[in-house]
Amino acid sequence: METYVQELPVLLQLNNNSNNNNLKMNLFENFKLGQNTDLKNRIVMAPLTRCRAIENIPNELMATYYKQRASAGLIISEGTSPSPNGLGYPRIPGAFSDDQINGWKTIAEAVHSENGKIFVQLMHTGRITAKANMPTGSVTLAPSNIQAAGEMFTETGMVAHEIPRTMTLEEIETTQNEYVLSAKRLVNEAGIDGVELHAANGYLMNQFINPKSNQREDQYGGSIENRTRFVLETAKKVAIEIGSDKVGIRFSPYGAYNDMLSDYEELENTFIHLSKELAKIELAYIHIVDQRVAFGAPDFTTNIKKIIKENFEGTVISGGDVDTVEKAEAILNSGLDLVYVGRPFISNPNFVKKLQDNEELVAPDVNTFYSPGEIGYTDY
Ligand code: PHB
């Protein structure tokens, strides 16, 4: 297989066609995302589940947390459910009630007061859930009624994932409309800069894409066109509502987390199809999570990041294990546009400055990743 180094001339060409005209080191310079969003640098704070949203409502503590990290070029929020049915984890925020939208308004104002930008990640957990975490009256829905292996944490311990119900066609449409309504309210009422559709890491959208969790025999399962239909239809509907340049999407090709099939025969063509279709609607970006690092996924069998970039042509974000300028610049020099950083942002709110000044990073305390309250959250 060719290496990145051998492929550099091709990637240089790609780079020439995008926003920047040469390969100079521009990690700390401005980047225009879509028509409306000016980022002050190319560092993106990755979405991180933090479980501080008591009763699923974003609060002042979360506003403080995001404000502390607003020197990122773009913050992508923690996974936020567009539906009561998508609240699989304890204390994750929603974006469907008035209180939740008001909470996001406070967060948007806090980030904007520091000249930062924030997209809210819309994460419907689908079958990755436990009844104990879900509000009364909600239902566990997925493309097929296949239980995910593994366990979910609840306030009282670990339990097997819920057995989901196969979504009806009507429920598919209702769920898509929940994404649309959340996106509309987040942008128009809360003043959030845009949304990211979470189609990675084994949650609902990924459950449709992946053949292990999608064994439908109707127009939403089987072929590449059918497995990607839920995601593409939703992306189009959301883009029509709030503008395509305010909509990004996250994929995890070759990911195995949450009981996904890591590799399958049509994988490469599935992501080529997604990239081409999303290019047609000029989505703001594709965000590729590299599960090899934080999630221990197997190695990629193709150069999938480059394949997605070539077929999408627009802004592509990726990263994985970035904690030095050199590692960040390697991502840009490979032809991608923005670099995501996850865990280091937990324990280094001023990560961008530390990177710039080559200061030592503080290690995060894993015991407080998901605990309620300010310890291990706003006290770094
Ligand atoms: C998690 O909370 O474990 C989690 C949530 C969203 C992801 C990945 C992991 O995309």
Image: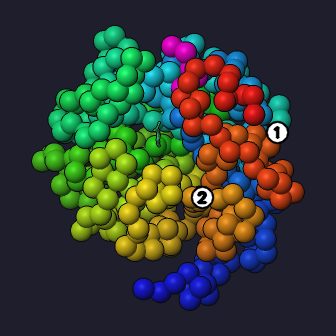
Q: Which mark is residue 321?
A: 2
Q: Mark 1: few, some, or many residues within 10 Å (few <14, many ≥20)?
A: some
Residue holding disc 1 = 115
Residue 175 at x, y percent in the picture: 35, 30
CA–CA distance between discs 2 and 1? 26 Å
Q: Is residue 172 shown left or right of residue 253?
A: left
- Which residue is at 79% across, 71% downward? 25
* Residue farthest along the left direction in this orientation: 217
User: In front here: 226 or 139?
Assistant: 139
Q: Secondary structure at mark 2?
A: loop
Q: Quadrant of the N terminus?
A: bottom left
Is residue 338 shown above or below 311? above
Residue 284 at x, y percent in the picture: 58, 52
* Magenta stretch, residue numbers: 51-55
Looking at the image, can residue 246 be seen?
no
- Which residue is at 35% across, 27% downward? 158
Residue 112 at x, y percent in the picture: 78, 33
Q: Secondary structure at mark 1?
A: loop
Query: Number of numbered discs present?
Result: 2
Image quadrant where residue 304 sits: bottom left
- Which residue is at 59% across, 30% downward? 368
